[in-house]
Amino acid sequence: MFNRLLDGIKVLELGNLVSGPFCAKILADLGAEVIKIEIPEHGDDARRNEPFLNDIPGLERSGLFLYLNMNKRGVTLNLETATGKEIFARLLRHTNVLVANVCSRRMEELGITYSAIRKINPGVVMTSITPFGLTGPYRHFGSTELINVSMGALAYASTREVGVDQEPLKMPAKFFSFQAGLSAAAATLGALYKQSISATGEHIDVSEQESIVQNLDPHLVAYRSQQQIVSRTDRLSRAPFHILRCKDGYIYNAFSEEKEWRKFVQVMGQPDWADSELFKDYASRAEYWDALKPLIEDWTMQFSMEEIYRMSQENGAPVGAVYTAKELLTDRQMAARGFFVELEHQVCGKLTYPGVPYVSSEATGAQPTAAPVLGQDNEEIYCRRLGYTRADLSKFAEAGII
Amino acid sequence: MPEEKWPMANPMLKGVRVTALVHVWAGPWAGAVLSDMGAEVIRVESHQRLDPSRGRAPFEAGKPGVNRSIVWNMHNRGMKSCTVNLKQPRGVELFRELVRKSDVVIDNLAPRVLPGLGLDYAALKAIKPDIIMVSLPGFGSAGPDRDYISYASTVASVGGLLDSFGYPGGEPALMGVHPPDPIGGMWGVVCALAALNHRSRTGRGQHLDLAQTEATTALLPEVIMEYSMNGRIRPRMGNRDEIMAPHGCYPCSGEDKWVAIAVRSHEEWDALRRIMEYPPWSDDEKFSDQYRRWQNQDLLNKHIAGWTRNFTHYEVMQKLQDSGIAAGAVLNIEELLNDPHVRERQVFFEQQHADAGKTLAYRPPWASALTKANPPAPCLGEHNGYVYKELLGLSDSAYDQLVDDKIIY
């Protein structure tokens, strides 16, 4: 449910693709006013990312962009021009926080550094998100999701039980770029809290590589205790902790305790083979997994993932259904919480999006708005708020300022 | 490895007190991050219901003990620990006193536990009207599936992360890591701080209830939008990108060494050709523009691998980055800990722990003058004296009696 917890907070966003825009989206979803600044004509690169509505590409048709930029106002501004810089300074004067995931070289070229913006707004919070942070030998490296998960030591041991010739495997889409944006939002909210108490700001330097480290605990523990380097070829030491086929897809049986396996055996109707010495504990089951897996699948292949998921969970076995988007969008629990939302967009019409994953007792039923078309709020922000005239706007556009 | 120093002079969350009823990973990570930001975070534990992670092997120096689990100490650094037996009414009373002195209560227990103890949000609000409560259950505190058992694996499946993970044309792949846990924890920090900001302006508290499944789905919109826009299930793509090529992990010299390369533009492709000294295969019209390179990426990848095999992964990374191409060595955990950039950024550090000797920790993924890692993980009940006598004002004799009666237990 959307709400207005950050009512009154103003955010300026110089974001591109995922991490910066997601950080700002989290604030926007909480009711902060976010003004997203895009390059005239060109816009955020996410606008050129699949999936496109009906597979027809267009600046206003990207599902990734539409999700990341809902609840924001959008303006265009050319920060290389003197007039553009002047307008930016005026916007900066009244903002609580600037979120940027533009590389530091570019920010320096544009004159948008923390020390420079503090002169305009001494108490401002600046959140910089870059692949490797603002210091260190890799600070100017170019990067993408694939590079981040590789340099973050996640890809090396991803996946398991494969041959050494199988290449390290990245996880889906831009999952970890999103995690970096989430982490940046947490830090930003802390700085905003301090700003609300003491009127002082701060520069937060978020590294996407360091964000990956949050996920490495199993590898760190193995290395710390035995100098063991977990690798893709490792077999799992307990079973089941595996993905199994069922009639219409897959389920994930990840049992940490013996009693959970016993409950699942009950759900399967206590087959005789389950009493075998070979399957007596999780280590033994792991050793004989090649024999055990087909026996379980003989049973699971008779049922849908939904059936197995419900039967198991209702009997105390922590099975997960490997949901695709189809099941997600009709899941009864997510529906009960109103997780998915429908928004009307100028170009794409009504679409369903993931909403926010929390429910607040202070929810005021705030209405979410769809992502802005390129330059949608130029008039609102430049004319109504900053006092330029429409004639000014025409000249700005013709001169490439907006 | 540097040793971390504390306390901070002027942290973000100075003066904020958090009471944490948490276990395993997601809740503790939220507590550790809030503690790094300067909040005082008190974990409420009990001998009669120990966090399973406290007993989880492996242990520091191989010696078992409730204060010696490597993973527990990594997740719970910076927090204080007090013990209380919540099965006893007097124990619940003591907990209520602690709530009265707190700004935030955070929990990642099963949804029925706190209401079962008479400690739901309505009850906490009656104790302290502006209390902020943040709950991090697997599926949500209300709804038909709220009592389902959730581990990171169930969250990853039901949240949609698992289905789109795997090699092209293959089945869903085993993850080996559990990202929903730290993700749930960081969302918990977001919720707590959003509520603190709100309270700063309005004086009001609230209950924020996060579902870990939804918290994972929120990071995978492409999966949802592919279906909601075009009625399709996003396929498993391995290391392939929608349009970048070359894009993938390529073998380098040495045992199991790889480099990740992502060519983002035609200019970068030209630069790569120059670095490879214009091998004849690169003239093939199959690779003459980005679309064709993407279409023929399997063949392209074979050729690139033929070149990368001659160099170490760090060499390829440096050569390509020097020419503005995104490339990164696929580091294993040992390489990461020893990497010069990671060392300079002081991401990892060791802490001196009363029972476990030296413990390993890493800071949250940002550098800021207002965030710095706090003390090492607490021993079980280490701060009972501080919490009960200093904070709650119990006399020595009252305290001793409660210990004898196994209320402070």
Image (cartoon, rainbow, N blue to C red):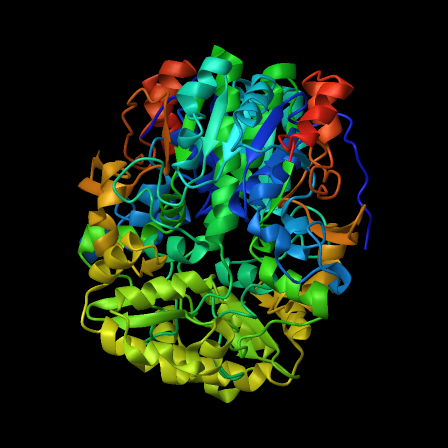
Using residue B82 as the reference point, say whether residue B166 is left or right of it: left
How many marks the image carries: the answer is: 0
Q: Relative to residue B184, is residue A376 depicted above or below?
A: above
Can residue A97 be seen here? The reply is: no
Q: Relative to residue A297, is residue A327 depicted above or below?
A: above
Closer to the camera, B17 or B224?
A: B17
Instruction: Say which residue appears at 57% left-offset and 27% top-offset.
Output: B91
Residue B115 position in % (x across, y down): 40, 29
Q: Quadrant of the N terminus of chain A?
A: top left
Instruction: Say which residue appears at 51% left-offset and 84% top-offset.
Output: A165
Q: Quadrant of the C terminus of chain A?
A: top left
Can residue A328 be seen here? The reply is: yes
Residue A146 position in % (x across, y down): 50, 63
Residue A344 position in % (x across, y down): 20, 35
Residue A24 position in % (x across, y down): 46, 35
Q: Relative to residue B408, is residue A219 depicted above or below?
A: below
Q: Relative to residue A144, is residue A28 depicted above or below?
A: above
Closer to the camera, B266 or A229?
A: A229
Q: Quadrant of residue B322?
A: bottom right
Using residue B2 as the reference point, say whether residue B368 is left or right of it: left
Instruction: Say which residue appears at 76% left-offset and 51% top-offset.
Output: B349
